Image (spheres, helix red, strand yellow):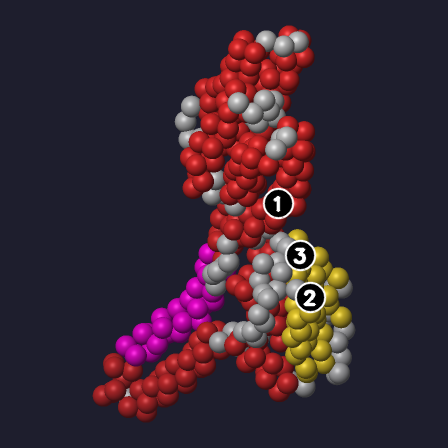
Amino acid sequence: MRITFDRATATRGQLRTLNLITGLPPIVGAGTLTLALDATSWWQVLILSTGLVAAVVAFERWAAYDLFRVAVPCLVVTVVLWPLGVLWLDSPSAYFGLCVVGSHLVPRLPRFRRAAAVALPLYIGVVGALYPILYGGEMPGTLIRYVLLPTVVTAVVAGFMFPNKRFYDVVEELEESRERDAELAVARERVRFAGDLHDIQGHTLHVVKLKTALARKLVRTDPARAEEELREIHALVSDTITQTRELVYAQRRLNLTVELQNAKNLFEAAGIAVSVDGAVSAGARPLLGQVLRETTTNILRHAQATTVRITLTGSGIAIVNDGAPREPAEPRGLAALRQRVADDGGVLRAQQRDGVFTTAATWEDTR
């Protein structure tokens, strides 16, 4: 059994959606406000809007973990726009694009992050200081609008992005750890299967070896006894073949209590919250364990579940999970199991609705 979906990728997608919903509107709103405050003509709107576009593109790519693909053009546009805003457009808010692009880029740099974190607000402050130096004006107000406010805002935003990056790093590490734990749990399941196979075949092969050696010795001195030994060997091998086939196709009677604990361990290792309602009854049908095992395998293989609820009743079992695939396709193992349940007098139902998948096996005869 192998987990074929990447939970880290799924988590990244969820975080990307959350970032776009919570971060993009404030960026667009603030950028639009700066345009309304500073631009006095259509050509100023056109020039200053390049900074807003660069900021939006950089943020969208940052949310998709692909910022470096657009980092250079976005950075060039915003780095050039700030001096233009100071020296030509008389726009103290032209630093906005550089503030957004630089703040998201600096924490993701592979090297020299601290130096870049200092250089970013320093560059904005130095360029902003050119305005009072060249054009004068009311000194306190000019310094605040062109130097102090842009520098402080950029430093605060860039400083906030460092712990923000660490948060996402921790989330990724947690998902990777969960995937490793899930793979380990699957490996333990494989070892358990190998142990079952060894229990079936190991003893049989050892007995066959001894009986074959005995038959060879008796074939001339006691043919009747040798023939009896060969019949026992044939019966033993036939029984072992049957047990092996049952194991391979998961047809042996499974202990529901053991399967329930195993399912909980596998789900928890995969980072899936699991709850169990009801208890295993003394007369639980053997096929209940098989239904639970097959459903557990299907969830780990095909779903992106975050929660699983297992309900045990006197008439059967129901397993409900979220994160079902958009295009439902019943696994072949479940289809084969439905026939076995029907042969035992029960009904196996599988239903998907609104991303929730339910597998339920019930029997009218509640023995």
Q: Is residue 124 left or right of residue 342?
A: left
In magenta stretch: residue 188: yes
User: What's the CA distance linking mark 2 and mark 3?
Assistant: 14 Å
Q: Secondary structure at mark 1?
A: helix
Q: Name the residue tied to disc 2.
A: 354
Dot 3 falls on a residue whose secondary structure is strand
Q: Does 121 sit above or below residue 260? A: above
Quick one: 44 or 56, which is closer to the camera? 44
Identify the residue shown where x is 47% and y is 33%: 77
Quadrant in the picture for residue 365: bottom right
Disc 1: which residue:
20
Q: How many marks?
A: 3
Q: Amino acid at mark 2?
A: Asp
Nearest-to-viewer mark from 2 and 3? 2
- Say whether disc 3 or disc 1 marks the residue closer to the N-terminus: 1
Q: Amino acid at mark 3?
A: Thr
C-alpha gap between disc 2 and disc 1: 24 Å
SS for callout 2? loop
Magenta segment, prevailing SS (helix, strand or loop): helix
Q: Which residue is mark 3?
A: 307
Is 154 magenta? The answer is no
Q: Is residue 285 left or right of residue 75?
A: right
Numbered range of the magenta stretch:
187-214
Q: Looking at numbered disc 1 in the image, what kind of residue is underneath it?
A: Leu
Is 134 left, or right, of 198 in this rendering? Answer: right
Tag 2: Cα neighbours inside 10 Å, few (<14), some, or many (≥20)? few
Instruction: Give the foreground label among 2 and 1.
Output: 1
Seen in the picture, residue 146 relative to 46 is either above or below; the reply is above
